[in-house]
Amino acid sequence: MKMLTNIYKSVANEKRLKMLLLLLKNKEMKLKDIYRKLRIPQATASRNLKILEKNHFVSSWYERGEVFYSIIESDDFPYNKVILDSIRRRKKEKGS
């Protein structure tokens, strides 16, 4: 039950939902592009992305001194997949 609580808490935040929408749209992004696009401080973006990473929504890696993030699309995390699919559907409904 704690796992589900953490998963839902991780997406019950407007900044994190916006990050997921950005990553769903762009497939992968540099950390600096995420915080610039959302107009938030780097520390805020990093903290929120770490929460999403801890709950298996995103993965990160370093390349040439920069941090990249992408959505995790895996059957290993079925609850996350359902949530991401819901976000995609909502995005299509709104025409974003």
Image (cartoon, helix red, strand yellow):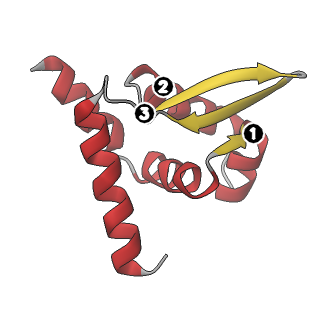
Q: Which residue is mark 3?
A: 57
Q: Amino acid at mark 3?
A: Phe
Marks 3 and 2 sit apart, C-alpha to C-alpha, by 6 Å
| Crowding near the residue tagged with mark 1, few <14, some 14–19, many ≥20 C-alpha atoms within 10 Å | some
Q: Which residue is mark 2?
A: 53
Residue at 45 percent of width and 31 percent of height: 52
The x, y position of residue 64, in whole percent, is 90, 22
Could you say which is closer to the camera, residue 47 or residue 62?
62
The x, y position of residue 68, in whole percent, is 71, 32
Disc number for residue 30: 1
| Crowding near the residue tagged with mark 2, few <14, some 14–19, many ≥20 C-alpha atoms within 10 Å | some
Could you say which is closer to the camera, residue 49 or residue 74?
74
Q: Amino acid at mark 2?
A: Glu
Q: Quadrant of residue 86?
A: bottom left
Going from N to C along the chain, the mark reached first, 3 or 1, is: 1
Residue at 38 percent of width and 79 percent of height: 94
Q: Are marks 3 and 2 in contact (CB under 8 Å)?
A: yes
Q: Amino acid at mark 1?
A: Lys
Q: Are marks 3 and 1 in contact (CB under 8 Å)?
A: no
Disc number for residue 8: none
Marks 2 and 1 sit apart, C-alpha to C-alpha, by 15 Å
The x, y position of residue 40, in whole percent, is 66, 50
Residue at 69 percent of width and 21 percent of height: 61
Badge 2 element: helix
Marks 3 and 1 sit apart, C-alpha to C-alpha, by 16 Å
